[in-house]
Image (cartoon, coloured by chain):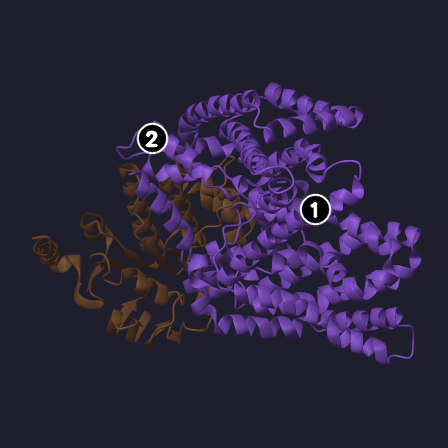
Chain colours: A purple, B brown
Amino acid sequence: MFYTLLRHGWLSFVRAHYFERSLGIKLLFGFVIFISLWYLFMIGLALPNLLENLFPEQYPHEAFFSLLLFVYGSELLARLFFQKVPRQRAINYLHLPVKKSFLARYTLIRSWFSGYNFFLLVFLVPFFMRTLYGPVSPEAFRNALLGCFLLSALNHSVGMVIKTRTAWKPSTLLAAGLLIAGLILAGYFFLEQLMAFSGQLGLALMKGNMWVFAGLVAVIGFLQLTIVQGLVKSFYTLSDQSAKSTEASLSGSFMEKLLAKVPVYGIFWELEWKLITRNKRARNNFYQWPLMLPILVYLFVYSPGEAFASMTPILMLFLGSYGINHLQFAFSWESRFFDLLATQNMSLQLFIRAKYFFYSLMALLQFFILLPFILWLNPDVFPLFTGLLLFAIGPAFCLLFFSGVSNSTRIDPNGKSFFNLEGTSGRLFISVLSIFFTLVPVYIVAWLLPMETMMGFSLAAGVTGLLFIIFNKQWVQAITNRFERTKYRNLNKYREK
Amino acid sequence: MTKIRIENLQKQYGQQIALDIDQLKIEQGQLVGIVGNNGAGKTTLFRLLLDLIEPTKGSVLINEKPVAGNNHWKPHTGSYLDEGFLIDFLKPEEFFHFTGDLYGMTPKAIDERLELFSRFMSDEILGQKKYIRQFSTGNKQKVGIIAAMLVQPELLILDEPFNFLDPTSQILIKRMLKQENEARHTTMLISSHNLNHITEICTRIILLEKGKIIKDLTPESGDMKEIEQYFSVNAE
């Protein structure tokens, strides 16, 4: 039975429709994993030299051990945000004659295979090989490696305990918040002591101190038992669909009412707004985007000259705002109900234009909010920012709509927001990349213009953008025609669950 | 007056023929029941009627104009096939107003029309502060049916409308369909596996098997036993 469940888990991964149908996404997925692991391995090899330079009075492994708590603190934080509890996989078996405790143990054991439990080893093995195996002893190498693996296991257990709790009371949340704040403050005020403790812990692990190992194993064992109990309880919540209904208390917000009043496009703008605010994946993308923007603008405002050539595509991406992020999946966001849209008394051209104006307006709003800061900090970059903004909502948006017609992948806008490959494909990757290449002719024109290159670039980008904005009706019509031609294929794919 | 005309319509998936209809005419005001076992081609027929899939050959005409690649039929057609006809992050009220608005109805007209469905909704749809995705399958089905009927279409297409509904709702929907058909002369195409419901309300019954029409009957002609016999023979 255990093997069957494991096999089902594997099949659900490799048979996910976005994964099954796209060779590109498999290659991309494999490439990203390979590159990430390669980087970790290389860091592990190079770090001893770096630590020797930074802390010449210490051995590299001692310097690393003094940072051990911070490394594993960060790892725990990453787990809390990103690591999934594979609990959802058990829901299909709850009605079958399989004990809940068995499913809980399966879920727990399944979680041990998570990449989070092993990825640091890719870095630690070469690092300890260089710093411990030869210089100290093979036993020290083995002990340190085992000890660090136990620290990962401890983090895994803590993360799972937190994540298997079905509901957090406000008082518990407050206590957890205070504890984290306390730890951060302690880290700030007692940094040296913490580093010293961390160093001692690392050395104890390296020397194979039985008390430390036994203590870690005991805590991990206790937490694993707690997780099984938590998982069994959490299955009841999973089965109870009504527990999910809390988010629906949103009544018509001010924004929804305002958008609804806009003539002609209002009905679609309201729908768009509801799509991005009421669905997890769309909403998280929406709220994360503006948070990143000020940092980037800050960098550009202070170093436009140095960053000009290499960073303009990225700046354009950010000035296009959430629109570029969202429109890369263009029509896939509506894939779950496109059958409805296709049979309603509405014009597809109007629908696409409404979408285009909506995201253009958002990019403009964001730009106007930033404008006082730009003018205050560095007025010289104003033409560059304006040119790139116009370019983003001109050719970049047009290209995204155009390539969006070819992306017939179904998306659940309410699906998870992190590491969600649904909707992605090799073709999508290429089309997003091609946005950057649209700037190449602009660079060439800028170089030919009889003025300073950055000003020429701003002018060329701005004029190109303006032309696309002025002639939006024409290219939207072309995209509508293209969509009509591929409608049957797209609708068919959208129906594939 | 002919509302729907089908000519040499065929839909093929690879080597498999999902639907193959030489000729079919449906007159204005007919309430047509489409019956057949799973895979008979009922939903394929509806998708072709609504221009959601491309016919391999042949054509569908509504009001004597081709459906494929045209929009002329949309202002007069209401339909609900499955959950792909619902916007699940809207509340039912919002969904009804969205649909009504597309058909040019005023908010007041939409609310008035919704009142006619109040018994069918039985206080479980409106004012629930829930998104459609949070409703039970039966209530989602009700939302879809109401949205399709809300706009007072000349042509109404419903795929398995009795599925997932409680007995009271099944009786109510039958009554509403019949009333709508009689009062407004609405042409209706309804598929179902429930022969009792179909024979009770439909003025014409089409039996599909492996994509082909094998019977085209009227309940008045007393041929219903043929249909019952067909399904019982298939079960044996």
Residue B206 visible, this angle:
yes
Task: Using the rendered view, name the quadrant where residue A2 is placed.
Answer: top left
Left or right placement of residue A316 versus residue A72 in this view: right
- The answer to which image quadrant residue B16 occupies is bottom left
Q: Does residue B225 lie above or below B170 as drawn? A: below
Residue displayed at 62% across by 70% down: A476
**Residue A398 shows up from this direction:** no
Rendered view: B162 above or below A77: below
Tell me the SS state at disc 2. helix
Residue indicated by mark 2? A102
Q: What count of labels does the image hold?
A: 2
In the rendered structure, the residue with mark 1 lies on which chain?
A
Q: Amino acid at mark 2?
A: Phe
Looking at the image, which is closer to me, A402 or A357?
A402
Q: Residue at x 62, y 37 (%)?
A: A75
Residue placed at 47% from the left, 63% from the top? A342
Q: Quadrant of the C terminus of chain A?
A: bottom left
Task: Please name the residue shown 65% across and 22% down the image.
Answer: A174
Q: Position of residue B229 (x, y in %)?
A: 8, 55
State the separation of the CA atoms marked 1 and 2: 43 Å
Crowding near pointer 2: few (<14 within 10 Å), some, many (20+)? some
Q: Are marks 1 and 2 on the same chain?
A: yes
Residue A65's x, y, as percent? Answer: 68, 33
Q: Position of residue A172 (x, y in %)?
A: 60, 20
Q: Earlier in the sequence, mark 1 or mark 2?
A: 1
The residue closer to the viewer here, A27 or A208, is A208
- Foreground tag (1 vs 2): 1
User: Mark on residue A47?
Assistant: 1
Q: Are marks 1 and 2 in contact (CB under 8 Å)?
A: no
Front one among B148 and A307:
A307
